[in-house]
Amino acid sequence: MLDALERVQVNSDKDRSGFQLTFNVSKQSPLMTTLLPAGYFDPMITRVVLIVTLNGFPNVLMDGIVTQQQLAPSNEPGQTKLTITGEDLSVLMDVIKIKLPMPMPQIAQINLILAKYMVFGIVPIVIPPIVPLIQNPLEKFDFQTGTDREHIRSIAANCGYVFYVEPGPAPLTSIAYFGPDVRIPIPQPALNINMDAHTNVESLSFTLNGLAKKIIVMTIFDPITKKIPIPIPLPNVSILRPPLGARLTPPAKIEFPEEFAMLKPDEAAQKALGLMWDNSDAVSASGSLDVLRYGRILRSRLLVGVRGVGLAYDGLYYVNSVTHNIKRGEYKQNFSLSRDGLISLTPLVPTSSPLP
């Protein structure tokens, strides 16, 4: 199987992770004559763990489930392609749709759902919402009307949280994280471009979207007569994801959502916090690098420094997504970055990191 493996691709972003294995096979290959007919890569029952050892340190890139097979026969000998596609273990939470009453707080609902998946090595990390919803189960309670993943992500969207399953750090283990989108403040080594011998990226481009920022004005009724509308603008800066640029991008749009007036105070406060934390970043970047030249594996959901671009775009960025492309003798990554504002807030960016 390893001799036939041509390429490995792993994609990791803020919502979910996926992988793809491409094999070169022939008619007499054991993959075609024995393993595939025997169910070696059967979807939804085959678990795949991908580990890359770099500088003596093992890195778990993927722990997931096969979801699809693709076979592309060829008239050329040995050029038949077998492609195996899969997702991280959160796909197991998205296979059964049920309608189930949930007469309990939201934090208890999430822990109850995630407890079923600990048998797969998924360790839950659940942070309670800042504004909990307190309901009398004799009057009203929640219903789960979809899959486990859909229900958890609907709760996360309402309170401005994120939910994802992160493979590792040890093989056959994963972390199911439900909480605010807080990026680890320890940055990864800087991405350098146009710096001669210090250059460690192959390409890098930036975009400033003037329409990304907006102001949301929520409307509530006065607590006495409950008839006079009171507009309350929400700030477009998240305290959990502070801007990394000194000159912020001004908002270009104003929105007036209508659902706030009909919500209870605790529901309105939770949704307002969710909108404040779910701000878009105006500055985005994309590029590619060679892992061997960079010296380590670039990770998503962390910070990274950028140097050599110029005063406006140098500085720290959030790593939104990373795609690993591995072939024989080659390991490259495509990545996307984002932040709000131009001109770095820090005079220097670290060129090395204490994280392995």
Image (tube, rainbow, N blue to C red):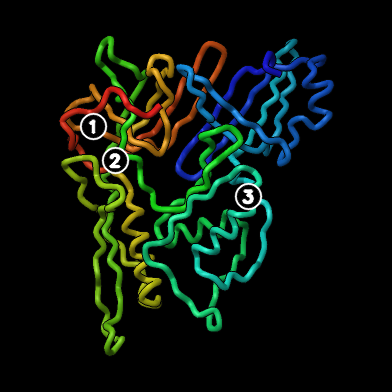
- Element assignment for label 2: strand
Q: Amino acid at mark 3?
A: Tyr
Disc number for residue 339: 2
| Mark with earlier residue (2, 3) | 3
Q: Quadrant of residue 4?
A: top right
* Quarter location, residue 354: top left
Residue 20 appears left or right of 250: right
On the rendered structure, is 332 left or right of 302?
right
Question: Which residue corresponds to mark 1?
Answer: 315
x 44%, y 51%: residue = 162
Tell which circle, 1 or 3, labels the residue nearer the N-terminal end.
3
Find the distance from the CA under tag 1 to the CA under tag 2: 10 Å
**How crowded is the residue under tag 1: few (<14 C-alpha within 10 Å), some, or many (20+)?**
many
Which residue corresponds to the image point at 59% horizontal and 60% vertical from the top-left? Answer: 112
> Which residue is labeled 3 in the image?
117
Q: Would you identify the image quadrant in which residue 293 lies? A: top left
Where residue 159 appears, x then y in whole percent? 41, 61
The reply to whether discs 1 and 2 touch (Cβ–Cβ < 8 Å) is yes
Up the image or down, 289 lies above or below 17; here it is: above
Front in this rendered view, residue 274 or 334: 274
Question: Of the residues under marks 1 and 2, which one precedes in the sequence?
Answer: 1
Residue 198 in percent (x, y) is at: 28, 14
